[in-house]
Image: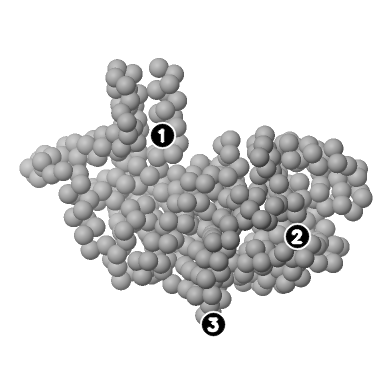
Amino acid sequence: MEGVQRLVNSLYRSHFGKMVTSLLVFSRRIDLEVAEDIVQDAFSSAVVEWQRVDPPQNPAGWIYRVCRNKAINWINGENRRTGSLISGLPCSEIVESEYSESKLEDYQLKLLFACAHPALAPKAQVVITLKYVANLKVEAIARALAMTVDGIDRILVRSRLKLTEEKIQLDEPDASLLRLRLPIVHKVLYLIFNEGYRSSSGRELIRSELCEDALIMCRSLIEGDVGNHETKALYSLMLLNSARFGSRFDAKGNIVDLEHQDRTVWNVDLIRLGQHYLNQSIQEEVSAYHTEASIACLHCAAPSFRRTDWAMIAKLYTQLLRNNPNPFVEVNRAIALYYSDGKDEAFRILEDLHQHPFFHQYFPLTSTLGKLHGLEGRRELARQFLTLALTQAKLDAEKKFVSEMMEAL
């Protein structure tokens, strides 16, 4: 029984949002509240059925099928008075008929475009998509958007209410309207990849499946002729960051910071591919993705940490902030300034940010302050920040990383 419950709990964490969104796209008759009820019921059915017989070889597929069958039953119940029943029509035929003219091949990408509905505010579009397509927890969404959990919950409640009251359908838009939703899609893919690159919840620091999902969807946009030059720049950024995955941990699973990473294990093929798409993306109009990809490219091209062009990286972060004010970017700019003879300015930025209620609890910022104060010989101040960082660390690898810095003091 415990094994079945663990399996269902795992599937719930990884598939609940995607199943809800698939039902919204499956039928115009189903709203968000109904879809959530159906999916909850399907998971309850799985617990009961799999305790009676062994779980199927494809448990996620089993639950998806039950969701679809329950959705059809619900629609039939709504339509009985009109006699418009669809029980004889296979689910696959319904889905294929809805998307017969689609320019998108990736099903998850279709859901992403469906959730980027213009009737919702931009931030609501991002939150809804991260929740129901990327299946991120509310805590992870709050962290990614530098918001409180309560703030995300309020957006979700208002969005559900708006979708229900105004009968807004989360459909895949016509091919001619896909480009209008592309900016939101880019932002969501960027946040999905970042959550995978450094997970804010769970036991793993890297969630490779999220990074892979984002890469696949971004590539599908390019190959499906839906993307633009910003899509290529975003894809370049993802590839260049992915190229360095193998050096971020040692053989024992311990975190290795950029300064001590073995650059010989960086994936040269991914770096070249990232550089290729960055070159292809260059136009007169430069987006934030172009700038971030250029920064990643400089890191990948540097022969060593000390020989990295930190001054240029600092300039690129300054350019990025000019058009897109962002406290997360400020942290990275400060680090680049520190290593490019701008130490006083770097500490001013970091310490100002640390006064903010959210960033006072932000582990990467606190640990960075501890490390940099330690490099400057301010051991007691470094120890204070590292002690605080130790309380903020959620993963064992993070705690060990901080503990080792404290021992080095």
**Could one spot residue 151 in this view of the protein?**
no
Secondary structure of the residue carrying tag 2 is loop
Which label sits in the foreground, 2 or 1?
2
Question: What quarter of the picture does the N terminus occupy?
Answer: top left
Question: What quarter of the picture does the C terminus occupy?
Answer: top right
4 left or right, relative to 149: left
Secondary structure of the residue carrying tag 3 is loop
Residue occupying image coordinates x 71% and y 46%: 256
Q: Which residue is mark 3?
A: 284
Q: Which residue is mark 2?
A: 305
Residue occupying image coordinates x 91% and y 43%: 380
Q: Residues within 10 Å of mark 3 (few under 14, many from 20)?
A: few
**Could one spot residue 361 in this view of the protein?**
yes
Q: Residues within 10 Å of mark 2 (few under 14, many from 20)?
A: some
**Contact between labelled residues 1 and 2, with CB atoms less than 8 Å apart:** no
Q: Position of residue 65 (x, y in %)?
A: 26, 37
